Image: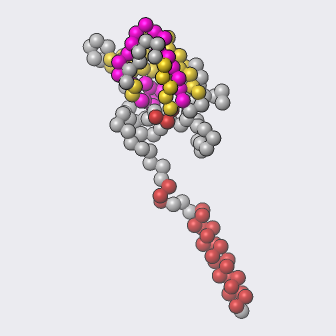
Amino acid sequence: MSGVASRRRGLFLLAVVAVALIAPTPGCSSTPDTVDYARPYPRAATRGATLDIQVFRRAQEIEFTNTTATAYGPSTLWLNGRYSRPIPGLAVGESMTLRLREFRDQHHEAYREGGFFATLKPDRLVLAQLETTGPTDEPFLLGLVVVGTGDEE
């Protein structure tokens, strides 16, 4: 009888361990970190020309260089009409490399950059825009040329 009871106790403990491993834990929530610059895409902003600034996607980063003859002050870089990140400015000839995970949407969710341990498919990069202000302090969006979308990897 003790052999049967011992076997039952062992099976019970195995079942408890299996349930504990499978059950979701409340500490594993995926609430995004909040940032002060998360906001909706400015749909009402005036659209300007497309600048001669090429945006290259390099794995989990983007790279671009201001090849225009105009310097831009503090601005916001928008990706895919959803994710934004402020930049301090962009001087003539200045290059920047930015992590895609630093771009956030209005709900503070980060751009899905992908990578080896990523559980979701990375977002494609299809649209890049620079939101800046003109002489009247009205915001407007300038298009940038997207060269790498992220499908190449």
Q: Is residue 144 visible?
A: no
Residue 136 placed where, x, y %? 26, 13
Hey, which residue is sitting farthest top in the picture? 69
Question: Residue 88 occupies which quadrant of the picture?
Answer: top left
Report the number of discs. 0
Tell me the residue at 53%/16% (across/down).
54
Answer whether residue 91 is magenta in the image.
no
Q: Is 59 placed left or right of 39 in the picture? A: right
Answer whether residue 71 is magenta in the image.
yes
* Position of 39 relative to 127 (above/below): below
Tell me the residue at 35%/22% (across/down).
74
Hey, which residue is sitting farthest bottom in the picture? 1
Q: Is 65 placed left or right of 88 in the picture? A: right
* Position of 69 relative to 33 (above/below): above
Q: Quadrant of the C terminus?
A: top right
Residue 71 placed where, x, y %? 39, 13
Q: How is the image coloured?
A: secondary structure
Question: Residue 141 occupies which quadrant of the picture?
Answer: top left
Q: Is 117 placed left or right of 33 in the picture? A: right
The part of the chain drawn in magenta is 61-85
Hey, which residue is sitting farthest left in the picture? 136
Tell me the residue at 45%/40% (across/down).
109
Q: Is residue 94 visible?
A: yes
Q: Quadrant of the N terminus?
A: bottom right
Tell me the residue at 56%/63% (across/down).
23
Residue 117 placed where, x, y %? 61, 44
* Position of 48 relative to 112 (above/below): above
Residue 37 placed where, x, y %? 36, 33
In depth, the one of 105 and 72 nearer the eye is: 72
